[in-house]
Image (cartoon, grey):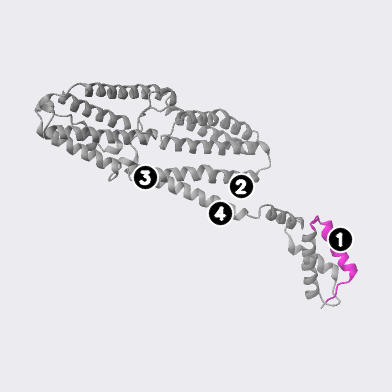
């Protein structure tokens, strides 16, 4: 076995330091490893310097400094591969939940809302931020990082808007205009002027910018510039006026001939059932059982969003509506032809109940109650 002298050991230390390796722990590991190779493989009378130069070349491709750079990278990003795996898995999970949730929503199956909620939330809060952290390390220019950051922010805002829209939360339209404004007025110009400066990417930048402008135009084309708020407020007022009218009609004394019998019992049950359904609709929309009188100031009006999952097939809401339909049919079979209740509810059921809006069903219930009350007077 070859024995290294102190001078040879000093030579190795100085050469490794001269090649740019400054980390003491890394230097010690390299020296120990190189010394072991030389002592085990160099013949007793062999050429130390030549053998050392051939050995040191096996540790790098271009320069020995690569080892220190890779070591620093691994120390800085010791969880790099774990984070990258989380990013990829979160992206796949987000897309899977969103696609399945969208299919469930299309088929009106229960669980659609929670799947879409999870998909968009994972995409906005986990996948996109991690994507930004990885992509920003691929470029050293601050302008490129700025464009990337605004693009990711736009993606997060778009996911958030979609979540608000699907869940029928207030503020969705404001969030959409904010997202569209950042995309069209900030992101696209920054992307274009930043990319056009590089001759290599010039054609690609122009092409991509044109596609982005078309996408922004399509989004804008599908956006209603006129808010539906005034229409929702008017419809809510209309519903409350019907409720007030019913209270006034109820205060009028009933016809003596209508005070007893199966018909009056049915009419009372119909009113109670209508009240249950209306409370359920209002609670699902506003998280309270009644619409407040100052609803316009508190932004608690009834919009045209579809009925909640409570009215999906087999759920409590649908079962109560079917019960009401049966009560109405029985009521109509007992009363005179000119006093029969309208068949609007049966039409809503036939057209698929879950596709109906909150206001459509509320209006239908109000009409049924008004007819019942008038028949008693």
Mark 1 — residue? 14
Front residue of this view, candidates 364 and 138: 364
Please name the residue shown 83% across and 67% down the image: 50
Q: Residues within 10 Å of mark 2 (few under 14, many from 20)?
A: few
Label 1 or label 3, whichever comes before in sequence order = 1
Please name the residue shown 85% across and 62% down the image: 13
Is residue 217 covered in magenta? Answer: no
CA distance for labels 2 and 3: 31 Å
Locate residue 276, reporting x and y percent.
Answer: 28, 36
Using the image, tell me which numbered label, if any, was put on residue 134: 2
Label 4 or label 3, whichever comes before in sequence order = 4
CA distance for labels 2 and 4: 12 Å
Mark 3 — residue? 103
User: Helix or strand or loop: what does disc 3 sit on?
Assistant: helix
User: Helix or strand or loop: what does disc 2 sit on?
Assistant: helix
Q: Residues within 10 Å of mark 3 (few under 14, many from 20)?
A: some
Q: Residues within 10 Å of mark 1 (few under 14, many from 20)?
A: few
CA distance for labels 4 and 3: 27 Å
Q: Is residue 282 left or right of residue 175?
A: left
Label 1 or label 4, whichever comes before in sequence order = 1
User: Helix or strand or loop: what does disc 4 sit on?
Assistant: helix
- Residue 106 falls in which quadrant of the image? top left
Q: Is residue 296 left or right of residue 251?
A: right
In magenta, the rendered stretch is: 2-23
Verify CB contact (< 8 Å) between mark 4 and mark 3: no
Label 2 or label 4, whichever comes before in sequence order = 4
CA distance for labels 1 and 3: 67 Å
Mark 4 — residue? 85
Viewer-nearest of discs 2 and 1: 2
């Amino acid at each position: 076995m070859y024995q290294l002298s102190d001078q040879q050991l000093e030579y190795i230390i100085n050469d490794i330091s001269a090649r740019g390796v400054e980390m003491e722990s890394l230097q010690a590991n390299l020296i120990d490893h190189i010394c072991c190779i030389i002592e085990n493989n160099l013949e007793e009378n062999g050429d130390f310097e030549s053998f050392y130069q051939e050995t040191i070349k096996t540790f790098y491709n271009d320069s020995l400094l690569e080892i220190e750079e890779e070591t620093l990278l691994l120390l800085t990003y010791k969880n790099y591969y774990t984070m990258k795996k989380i990013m990829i898995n979160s992206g796949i999970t987000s897309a899977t939940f969103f696609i399945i949730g969208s299919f469930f929503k299309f088929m009106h199956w229960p669980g659609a809302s929670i799947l879409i909620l999870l998909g968009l939330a994972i995409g906005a809060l986990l996948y996109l931020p991690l994507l930004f952290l990885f992509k920003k390390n691929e470029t050293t220019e601050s302008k490129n990082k700025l464009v990337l950051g605004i693009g990711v922010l736009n993606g997060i805002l778009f996911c958030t808007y979609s979540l608000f829209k699907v869940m029928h939360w207030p503020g969705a339209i404001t969030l959409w205009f904010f997202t569209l404004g950042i995309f069209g007025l900030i992101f696209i110009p920054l992307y274009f002027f930043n990319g056009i400066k590089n001759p290599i990417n010039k054609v690609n930048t122009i092409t991509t910018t044109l596609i982005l402008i078309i996408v922004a135009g399509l989004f804008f084309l599908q956006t209603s510039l006129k808010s539906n708020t005034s229409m929702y407020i008017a419809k809510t007022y209309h519903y409350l006026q019907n409720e007030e009218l019913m209270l006034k009609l109820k205060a009028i004394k009933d016809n003596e001939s209508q005070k007893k019998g199966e018909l009056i019992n049915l009419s009372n049950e119909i009113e109670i059932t209508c009240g249950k359904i209306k409370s359920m609709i209002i609670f699902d929309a506003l998280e309270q059982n009644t619409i407040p009188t100052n609803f316009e100031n508190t932004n608690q009006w009834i919009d045209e969003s579809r009925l909640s999952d409570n009215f999906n097939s087999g759920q409590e809401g649908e079962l109560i509506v079917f019960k009401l339909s049966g009560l109405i049919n029985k009521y109509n079979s007992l009363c005179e032809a000119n006093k029969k209740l309208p068949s609007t509810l049966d039409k809503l059921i036939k057209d698929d109940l879950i596709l109906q809006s909150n206001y459509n069903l509320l209006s239908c219930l109000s009409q049924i109650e008004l007819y019942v009350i008038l028949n008693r007077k």
